[in-house]
Amino acid sequence: MSNVVNRVFRLRQRPTDRVTEADLELTEEQVPELADGQALVRTLYLSLDASSRLWMSDRKTYIEPVPIDGVMRGLGVGQVVGSRRGDMKAGDLVTGFPGWQDYSVADDTDNEFPFTVLPDPLPAPLPSMLGALGMTGISAYLGLELIGKPQDGETMVVTAAAGAVGNVAGQVGKARGARVVGIAGADDKCAMLVDELGFDAAVNYKADDWARQIDEATPDGIDVQFENVGGPVLNHCISRINRDGRVVLSGIMSQYGGAGAPELDLFPLIVARGLMRAFIVFDHQDRYAEAVDHLGGLVSSGRLKTRETVVEGLQNTLSALNDLYDGRNTGKLVVHVADPEPN
Amino acid sequence: MSNVVNRVFRLRQRPTDRVTEADLELTEEQVPELADGQALVRTLYLSLDASSRLWMSDRKTYIEPVPIDGVMRGLGVGQVVGSRRGDMKAGDLVTGFPGWQDYSVADDTDNEFPFTVLPDPLPAPLPSMLGALGMTGISAYLGLELIGKPQDGETMVVTAAAGAVGNVAGQVGKARGARVVGIAGADDKCAMLVDELGFDAAVNYKADDWARQIDEATPDGIDVQFENVGGPVLNHCISRINRDGRVVLSGIMSQYGGAGAPELDLFPLIVARGLMRAFIVFDHQDRYAEAVDHLGGLVSSGRLKTRETVVEGLQNTLSALNDLYDGRNTGKLVVHVADPEPN
């Protein structure tokens, strides 16, 4: 492979606002040589996530920041194109953290971000293996299993509801019998949530009267808040929290760029004897299989519709991340890097 | 009793800032006549609580606001001075919600705020039965039992630490083996916490460098935040929360007067997989006996020191409540209304 170019995004400096080409440089490098216990993975699809932006910052988080000059971290699916490890062979489809590059090394001593071989046949197309059946879908499922626990007839609000985690959380909540209200940033997204994904209502938070619309969509208050954004919408929803309500702190995307802390009134949470709890999906690897099994079942029965936005070409990964923060995607945002070779 | 005057504080309007005599009027009324199933209770001590202020507002809370022209609600201890109910006899010492008045009626059909007869002999002096062994002590104990769960060697921060709930929470935390740091609003209170109550450190939040002092007092981060105040100190402490940290939302006294919501950065809570949970002590009546038993044991063994500030005279109850919000008390703030008659 020594004559093949590996395109690599390296972090040159930490972004202060939007991510620029000065922050992330696209370089051309040699494809790594393999040692024993390693496989070479060709990236097929990269996952773009709200946390991608976070990993570029030097803020203390649940994993180390990407080091300066390091390869940008990213989830993805790939195909083994060369192997010196016994548990992976050329042609295998794998998922893990290839990073933002064409080729990565799957080392069998990597316990932190190991690649795993995907099932054959796949339960869903490759982009869905990064979305509804990938880490974002698993996050949605586990956030509800571990914290939100929506019950039949309860009201659940999901923010960033048209996003990768949110759309699955809403559909899983519906499958559990909850009344589900989605919050999104565009009228067409709101229409999609209701008309295509079966949400009971959706509110465009960019509307002038978004707060009144949330009130009208949650006449019986809010039992579960599945929160991906933070800020004024969260504050308003907490003001409507019911007795023994639960706030799933899945993320606060509004602050990942380094914005200051918003105002938050905890008083209604006290009145409600409420719970607010965060979780990190990577802590719960022991439940991934259960999650994928459950989500796969919902997909098979038509109760979970998969939604992806596919951007073409590794070179467009950087602008796609900014699109994610601008809310241009619907469902899971992935970058198509290459097609698998037939086995 | 018809020639005896009952002094009664009635709520004439809802206070907007400090409570004034225009809000709470001290009137003179007749002592009520008893019907079957009722006992007449003479108030001996009244409990002043952060929540007293809250009950005067019309904000949605965990119990109904005091109605306009209603008797101001308040916890207290009293003595039965006349009885037409079989389970209470003249001379009995009781605790419940006498309200801010000399005489109240204990009706055996009142299930919401029933009076109960205190043990004979008392395990502690009457003011302590409203403090360390009363609702505030029980709140401290249950907040740690249900949510905080400080473990041996963990770091716990308590706000309003010289107050009625805080000082007990800190001492119970110490008894559980935690390193305990108290936050209070005066140097002499901080000295008292460390020198008399055995806290490991205390920080005066009015000092210019309070944030740096908290950092120095919690070199290993914060595992449990026992929160009574809310606002900038809470925000700073959450920035220091450790993995799997717990925030006990006992109260947010800073907002009970109607102040706006402060800024709160939830990001560190996500990183920590943290938990923030509120509770209302009145929900847990089934555990009061266990709590008093545990707290009484700590008092007996010298590990829980009781602290009260006693204000003399029912007529001074209103100004005493403002004192509470000004932080003039140390430990439980009670008003001495009358002495018990010997049996």
Image (cartoon, coloured by chain):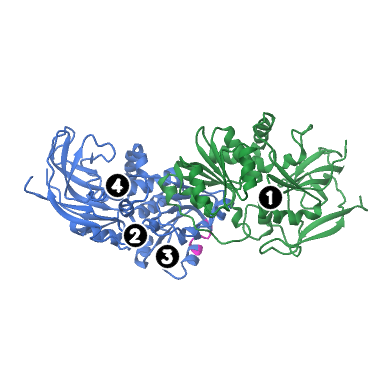
Chain colours: A blue, B green
Going by the image, does B12 lie left or right of A264?
Answer: right
Magenta stretch in the rendered image: A215-221
Give how far across and how far down residue A32 sits, in percent.
Answer: 13, 43
Give how far across and how far down residue B20 sits, in percent.
Answer: 73, 62
Q: Which mark is residue B49?
A: 1
Q: Which mark is residue A134?
A: 4
User: Does dot 1 land on a helix, a strand or a loop?
Assistant: loop
- Residue A145, image quadrant: top left
Gap in angstroms between the C-alphas marked 3 and 2:
20 Å
Task: Please tell me how crowded label 2 is: few (under 14), some (14-19), or many (20+) other residues with Cα within 10 Å.
Answer: few
User: Does dot 3 land on a helix, a strand or a loop?
Assistant: loop
Residue contact at pointers 2 and 4, CB within 8 angstroms: no
Magenta run includes residue B160: no
Residue indicated by mark 2: A196
Q: Nearer the viewer, mark 3 or mark 2?
A: 3
Earlier residue among tags 3 and 2: 2
